[in-house]
């Protein structure tokens, strides 16, 4: 991913400074500079000239992000090696944030629930830490899924 990000400035130049390419480059830079929690609460909406419009899930996030906008602008422009963003406008738009939200790493459909209960219930019950127990069960479910796919394929 880092090598692709380093190519963004050249891609913008080669596009003839195309507005759509600039916008997508800024969106990619936004994604690279934000963490998982921020990606769950904010999403890029539009780049208009040098103003980046970011949707937030609520007013609290909007207020917090406005305080951090100078640092974000610096990070984005540094990554892009050009002053493509001079201002960030934050708007409360929970619908857009939900649409653009990355998939949750914890979302996983358990198709082998009965096998998990039979084969792993005793072992899982011995794990006192709730988060560790959940991680153990998810890893086991994924392993069973892979075994089933391998057996079919």
Image (cartoon, rainbow, N blue to C red):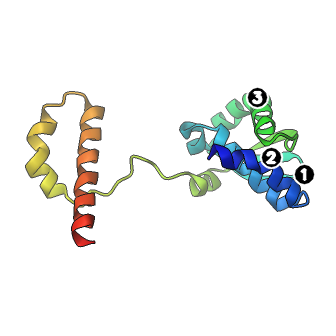
> Distance between the Cα atoms at labels 1 and 2?
8 Å
Horizontal and vertical percent position of residue 19: 86, 59
> Distance between the Cα atoms at labels 3 and 2?
14 Å
SS label for mark 2: strand
Circles 3 and 2, Cβ within 8 Å, touching? The answer is no
| Residue drawn 28% across the image and 46% down it | 138
First-in-chain label (3 vs 1): 1
| Residue drawn 27% across the image and 59% down it | 146
SS label for mark 1: loop
Horizontal placement of 37 versus 50: left or right? left
Compared to residue 71, the image places residue 94 above or below, namely below
| Residue drawn 81% across the image and 48% down it | 9
Horizontal and vertical percent position of residue 76: 76, 38
SS label for mark 3: helix
> Distance between the Cα atoms at labels 3 and 1?
19 Å
Q: Which residue is mark 1?
A: 49
Name the residue nearer the viewer: 53 or 153.
153
Q: Is residue 20 visible?
A: yes
Horizontal placement of 113 versus 42: left or right? left
First-in-chain label (3 vs 2): 2
Q: Which residue is mark 2?
A: 52
Q: Which residue is mark 3?
A: 71
Horizontal and vertical percent position of residue 119: 9, 49
Q: Is residue 92 visible?
A: no
Query: Can you name the residue that lies furthest to the bottom here?
Result: 152
């Amino acid at each position: 991913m880092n090598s692709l990000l380093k190519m963004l400035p050249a891609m913008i130049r080669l596009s003839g400074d195309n507005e759509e390419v600039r916008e997508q480059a800024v969106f990619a830079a936004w994604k690279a500079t934000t963490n998982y929690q921020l990606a769950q609460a904010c999403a890029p909406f539009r780049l208009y000239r040098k103003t980046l419009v970011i949707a937030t899930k609520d007013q609290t996030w909007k207020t917090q992000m406005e305080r951090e906008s100078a640092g974000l602008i610096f990070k984005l422009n540094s990554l892009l090696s050009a002053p493509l963003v001079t201002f960030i406008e934050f708007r409360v738009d929970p619908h857009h944030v939900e649409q653009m939200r990355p998939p949750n790493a914890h979302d996983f459909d358990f198709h082998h629930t009965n096998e998990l209960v039979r084969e792993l219930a005793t072992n899982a019950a011995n794990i006192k830490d709730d988060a560790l127990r959940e991680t153990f069960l998810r890893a086991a479910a994924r392993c069973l899924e892979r075994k089933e796919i391998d057996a079919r394929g």
